[in-house]
Image: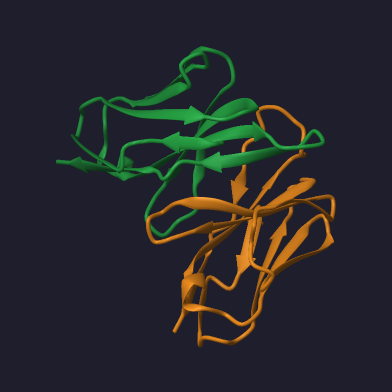
Amino acid sequence: DTAVSQTPKYLVTQMGNDKSIKCEQNLGHDTMYWYKQDSKKFLKIMFSYNNKELIINETVPNRFSPKSPDKAHLNLHINSLELGDSAVYFCASSPSKTGRNEKLFFGSGTQLSVL
Amino acid sequence: GQNIDQPTEMTATEGAIVQINCTYQTSGFNGLFWYQQHAGEAPTFLSYNVLDGLEEKGRFSSFLSRSKGYSYLLLKELQMKDSASYLCAVRDFWASGTYKYIFGTGTRLKVLA
């Protein structure tokens, strides 16, 4: 009954490979996000979707392609992985895109290591 | 532009009080959040301020001054389990009625026995 669940928790892969991270929320929220946390613990937004529609795309390379089949799911596909993609990727959700006092609920993170 | 600053590391003793400061510059401020993140875990919500003043919640309090672009998180009666990173985040107006949550780099707090 985890609120925001993402898989896998750990992902180790070779440079040049393609990989996907999946995220699902059972909170009934309209808005979902992908954040990247680097080795210095800086949490930077990558994408935001509201009810399956892309609303924020923060200058992320085209190799990253989010997909939202429905408002409860937001997956992240990464093509041609590079060393610099190594980081922890967090999925998050919030009730809506416009509401006030709406905190983010985070998934447990996916630690991606590109060798 | 958007900028959020907080100290990188702080150390305090069990039972003491510690204040973690956060200064921010954003164009469409719509609330400030504090999150706690233990090593290897997801950030979890601690507090929210949108109006000036102090919000108290048990051992944790958070203060906001919008005119100064300043907030702090106050932790009282420190416990060893409070050793974690504390992330300051601002919700900033983005476009078309949407908001973006912008995080600072986090303050790593070490509580010593």
Chain whose colour in the figure is green: B
**Rendered colour, chain A:** orange
Q: How many marks?
A: 0
Q: Position of residue A86 (x, y in %)?
A: 47, 71
Classify residue A68 as left or right of residue B83.
right
Of residues A89 and B105, which is closer to you in this image? B105
Residue drawn at the location 61% of the way across and 40% of the way down:
B101
Residue drawn at the location 40% of the way across and 30% of the way down:
B22
Residue A96 image-quadrant placement? top right
Of residues B58 and A42, which is closer to you in this image? A42
Residue drawn at the location 31% of the way across and 37% of the way down:
B7
- Image color mode: by chain
User: Relative to residue B27, is residue B109 depicted above or below?
Assistant: below
User: Relative to residue B39, is residue B44 depicted above or below?
Assistant: above
Q: Is residue A81 visible?
A: yes
Q: Position of residue A36 (x, y in %)?
A: 54, 59
Q: Position of residue B1 (x, y in %)?
A: 56, 36
In the image, farthest residue toward the left: B113
Residue drawn at the location 66% of the way across and 73% of the way down:
A63
Residue B5 image-quadrant placement? top left
User: Relative to residue A60, is residue B90 depicted above or below?
Assistant: above
Q: Position of residue A72 (x, y in %)?
A: 78, 56
Q: Is residue B57 visible?
A: no
Of residues B62 and A59, which is closer to you in this image? A59
User: Relative to residue B47, is residue A51 depicted above or below?
Assistant: below
In the image, farthest residue toward the front: B1
Classify residue A16 as left or right of residue B108.
right
